[in-house]
Structure formats: structure tokens, C-alpha cells
Image: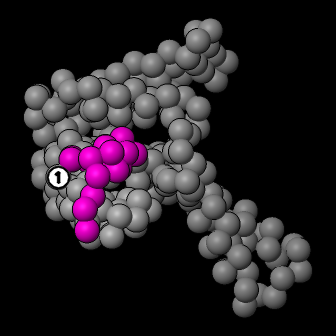
Amino acid sequence: MEISAKLVKELREKTGAGMMDCKKALVEAGGDMEKAVEILRKRGIAKAEKKASREVKDGLIHAYIHPGGKLGVLVEVNCETDFVAKTENFQEFVHNIAMHIAASNPLAIDRESLAQDVIDREMRIFREQAVESGKPENIVEKIASGKMEKFYSETVLLEQPYIRDPEKTVKDYQTEIIARIGENISIRRFVRYQIGD
């Protein structure tokens, strides 16, 4: 099947993948744009997973001050090399993560870094709510666990819906960038300041 340059260009603009990767994905998908996007996403995730174990020693510290000066974020994002830290893709990612933190106010980067007392408190509240609503004891744990999953998706940075594309999580966005730039990336730490908090 002949794949037009226009179709390859359209897929590249949609995904940010390389021209040859776009052409291969379109050939494999028989010219179907949606299938080609899915193929590229799967390959990107596979590439990103291979890079996840590589050490990140470089990166950027970025300050974002929301217009009006009443809200600010300081974030450190690491990558493998100084070269990548200076690229537009990486810098845009860091800036977008800082803006996301400003807008979504996460409590932690991932579940592992969420304070255990916060987890215990929320689980206790969800159990009590289930019991008070008259639910049988055998499903109280299931209800509480379901509510904890929702709590994680609202308060854990990597699990939050990404503000610029709520169809994907911050982790999905990070994985796409790792696949695009070819290096491991890690959001190391952040602080969010708000007047009055």
C-alpha cells in the first residue's frame, strides 16, 4: 500500500513520532490513522519502559508563577543528560508539569511517596462512610478500596488526569515524552505555594 507524505506528516503532527516510525505505523495499519496512532503509542510505551531503569542525573529546576502572583510552583524534573535538559521538548514538559501542579494541587508524585498517615486516614473515613450508609460488612472493604482508587487519581500527580488532555494521565504524558526524546525522565520533587495556605 502506498502511504502519502501528507498522511505521514499528519500522523507526525498528531503524535510527535519520527517520520520513519509514522510511515511504518501507517503501512502496518493499512493507512488507518487511528490504528497507526495506537501502534505508535504501544511502541512508545515499550520504548519508555526499557528506559525506565536508566539513571537520571541531570535535568531542570523550574519555577512557575501563576498570573496574579498568588500561586507558584517549584519543580525538579530529571533526565539522563545535559543535552536533553536543554531541548525544547524537555523544557516544555517541565513547564507543563509545573502548570499542572499549580492547577491540580497534588499531594505527592506517586502512591509510594504519599504519607502513610494520609492513606490510613482516608481509608478509615471511607470505611466509616460505607458502614454508616448501611452497607453489609462484606462489601465495606470493596467500597473503601474503590474510593481510595478515586482518591489516588485526584491527589497523586502521576495518576491525575493531565490538565491539557484529560483523556490521559500525567504518567501517560510522561511516557510519551520519554518515547519522543529517547531518555528516561523522572519528576523528582515539587513545592506548591499559595497565598494564605
Residue at point 48% right, 52% down?
A: 169
Coloration mode: one colour
Instruction: Look at 27% across and 47% down and name the residue there.
Output: 5
Q: Residue 132's x, y, as percent?
A: 87, 72
For the C terminus, which image quadrant?
top right
Give the x, y percent position of residue 91. Answer: 30, 26
Question: Is residue 72 among what the camera can see?
Answer: yes
Look at 21% across and 62% down and name the residue there: 24
> Is residue 55 covered in magenta?
no
Residue 135, given in percent of the width and then of the height, sits at: 84, 82
Give the camera-side residue of 173 and 64. Answer: 173
Identity of the residue furthest to the top in this view: 68
Foreground of the two, 169 or 191: 169
Placement of 167 over or under 36, stated as above or below: above
Residue type (three-letter) at the residue carrying disc 1: Met
Name the residue that disc number 1 marks.
20
Give residue 6's quadrant in the image: top left
**Residue range (magenta):** 1-19
